[in-house]
Image (cartoon, rainbow, N blue to C red):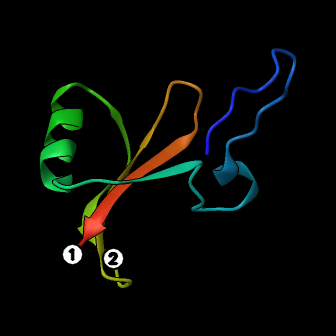
Amino acid sequence: MLSQAPANAILTPHWKVNHGMWNAYFWVNDVDALHAEFTQRGARIDYGLGNKPYGIREFGVQDLDGHDLAFGQPA
């Protein structure tokens, strides 16, 4: 669930409070293709594409406000 914060809200990226925590996680059908597209377009890759011990292939980016967004699919 997403909602817009009030204009005067002070927003802190989750990773600044809890190391390694995302602000949002998106399940995708082709994480490799998405990673290639984001890389080609110059996205700020937060952590590279890889298979995680919990059975997910994922990567993360940081948006323009410093929030971490992760994208993954079952490995």
Which residue corresponds to the image point at 33% horizontal and 76% vertical from the top-left? 52
Residue visible at 27% across and 65% down in the picture: 73
**From the viewer's perspective, is 57 left or right of 64?**
left
Identity of the residue furthest to the top in this view: 7
Q: Which residue is mark 1?
A: 75
Instruction: Give the mark count.
Output: 2
- The span from disc 1 to disc 2 (Cα, nearest Å) is 8 Å
Q: Quadrant of residue 72?
A: bottom left
User: Quarter of the image containing the C terminus?
Assistant: bottom left
Q: Which percent across, then down, holds residue 38?
A: 24, 35
Residue 44: which quarter of the image?
top left
Callout 1–callout 2 Cβ contact below 8 Å: yes
Q: Quick one: SS at disc 1? A: loop
Mark 1 and mark 2 lie on one chain; the one further toward the N terminus is 2
Query: Which residue is painted at 26% across and 26% down in the image?
Result: 42
Q: Position of residue 33 (x, y in %)?
A: 12, 46
User: What residue is disc 2 on?
Assistant: 52
Q: 30 or 3, which is in the foreground?
A: 3
Residue 8 percent across, percent down from the top left: 87, 17
State the SS at label 2: loop
